[in-house]
Amino acid sequence: MKLARWLMGGFALAVLLLLGLASVWAPDKPVSALTARWAPSPSRFLALNGVQVHLRDEGPRSDSVPIVLVHGTSASLHTWDGWAASLRRSRRVIRFDLPGFGLTGPSPDDDYSLAAYTRITLQLLDSLGVARFAIAGNSLGGEVAWHVAAAAPDRVDALILVDAAGYPMASQKVPIGFRMARTRGLEWLFTRILPRGVVESSVRSVYGDPSRVSDSLVTRYFELTLRQGNRASLPRRFAQSANAADSTRIATIRAPTLIMWGGRDGLIPPDHAGRFARDIGGSRIELFPELGHVPHEEDPTRTVAAAEAFLRCPRCTAVR
């Protein structure tokens, strides 16, 4: 009798565990299953270095100096929707998904170094026939942006750094998704199990006001994370991080620069804005005290207004 009860209890526990696993089981999705929702016109794909880069190129082609927008880790070109809607009225706006993120998907040679991201950014612009440009980037995208400015100073008309990486960080708040991706031994589990709550918690943690995080926003991050190969790429991206080893290059930047920061950024502390300002002569800081790590996404109206004022006359605020 006791054995029968033990077996019934064990069976019930196994059923509960299987049901729990089924509720968080999230296998990769092929890009073809995601494009209808996340890549409608004007999205298109451009073959570069063995990947199909997802991009949007909007606004007047008469603009001789387009603005390029580069997203951060685990984000996508959609993070710039608010900025693009305003900027494209008068400017040509180019944004794309970096390899390993969004709909572009993984790098075929597993190269997620800053050198690789810098190279593909410039190759993309070459393919689009863009000689000179302004470039803005958030977090990892900001690090890519300043690397582009350092590598191709003759091509960068203006630089906007939005809570950009570049110096050694002492983060106060790291999204749970990032912590999972950095934990050795969890790679197999991380690429097959993804509770939606993990994504929601991660997004909320980078907002100054978590109440601004909508269900539709979480859905976007969740579904694009499931793009085939993205989750496997993230641990490799972190493993290849240079940990600000080349931060001395920041002082070589001569492009007029706007440094934008959220005062509630717990991932890259606001005092990093001052470090960029000290290293980039003539640069200007715009601080948004109530916003978090992604101020361009959290409050696109106010942040793009600051960007547009700067872009109207970049050298008016940068004395050389």
Image (cartoon, helix red, strand yellow):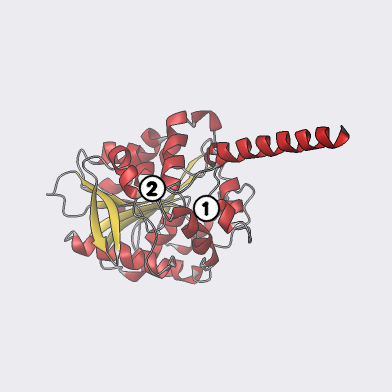
User: Percent position (x, y) of residue 203?
Assistant: 52, 40
State the mark number for residue 76: 2
Q: CA distance from mark 2 to mark 1?
A: 19 Å
> Foreground: 303 or 43?
43
Q: Label 2 is placed on what type of residue?
A: Ser
The residue at 34%/37% (across/down) is: 82
Q: Establish if 136 lies above or below 19.
A: below
Residue 52, by quadrant, is: bottom left
Q: Establish if 23 lies above or below 236.
A: above
Q: Is residue 150 left or right of residue 243?
A: left
The residue at 39%/53% (across/down) is: 137
Please identify the quadrant where the N terminus is shown. top right
The residue at 43%/67% (across/down) is: 110
Q: How many marks?
A: 2
Please identify the quadrant where the C terminus is shown. bottom left
Q: Is residue 20 left or right of residue 112?
A: right
Q: Which residue is mark 1?
A: 191
